[in-house]
Amino acid sequence: MTAPVIGVLALQGDVREHLVALAAADAVARPVRRPEELAEADGLVIPGGESTTISKLTVLFGLMEPLRARVRAGMPVYGTCAGMIMLADKILDPRSGQETVGGIDMIVRRNAFGRQNESFEAAVEVKGISGDPVEGVFIRAPWVESVGASAEVLAEHGGHIVAVRQGNALATSFHPELTGDHRVHRLFTDMVRASRRGESL
Ligand SMILES: NC(=O)CC[C@H](N)C(=O)O
């Protein structure tokens, strides 16, 4: 089977780093700014950045509804940091008018770690990733206040949920694209491959 095409929502945030990490994980990685580009992707990464800006631009670029429809239809999607916020069904403290794509039955708190620490790194054990813990880079990161019954917690840090999966939607508070360790991106590309085969991983 040919390599899966994985898009990176390229409206704001650390798009380039995800394109590099996905290519290293043997996907064909492409920036996505238009609905036609989204339609060609087998899966999508929503990068870190500023969730209020990404939310606004997603609406402005006509991508919010197509994205919601694809996620509802089971397209694999992975959100890091601001991208995690975009995948939450509910934000505890949204800016006014801030919309999300949704897809994961969880409530997130924006900038949750940021109040104590602007930015830090920590070793995080992630379910489904074997070997050493993942080096978690947290940059004004959200945490997950609570998850619903259909969402699975994959990792916690300091007593807070920092990685979640629900079906084909994956979200982390931290940024694996910044570390050169591509295991989380490989987990995601494996999810995309399984979904193309009509399976779920
Ligand atoms: N590194 C990040 O993605 C930061 C997220 C940012 N604090 C937000 O609310 O969107």
Image (cartoon, rainbow, N blue to C red):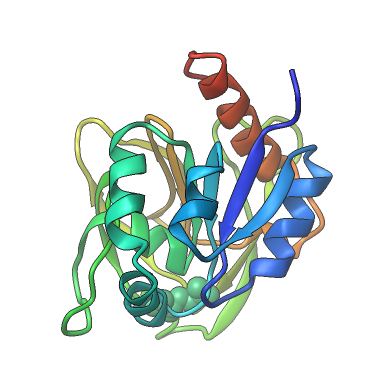
Residue found 29% across the figure and 56% down from its top = 101
Q: Is residue 113 left or right of residue 55?
A: right
Q: Is residue 2 left or right of residue 163?
A: right
Write down the quadrant of residue 10 in the picture: bottom right
Q: Quadrant of ligand 1?
A: bottom left
Position above or below: 131 against 176: above
For this view, does 141 lie left or right of residue 130?
A: left
73, above or below 82, in the image: above
Residue 84 position within the rendered picture, expressed as x and y whole percent measured from the top left = 41, 59
Give the quarter of the figure containing the N terminus. Answer: top right
Q: In the rendering, at what x and y percent does residue 17 appear?
A: 73, 65
Name the residue nearer the viewer: 195 or 116: 195
- Compared across the picture, whether 96 is left or right of 156 comes to left
Question: Residue at 80% across / 37% down in the picture?
Answer: 26
Q: Position of residue 180 (x, y in %)?
A: 82, 57
Tell me the residue at 52%/74% (across/down): 11
Residue 111 in view, yes or no? no
The answer to which image quadrant residue 189 occupies is top right
What residue do we see at 45% from left, 62% from top? 83
Residue lying at the far front in this picture: please name it. 36
The spot of residue 13 in percent (x, y) is 57, 76
- Quick one: 28 or 141, which is closer to the camera? 28
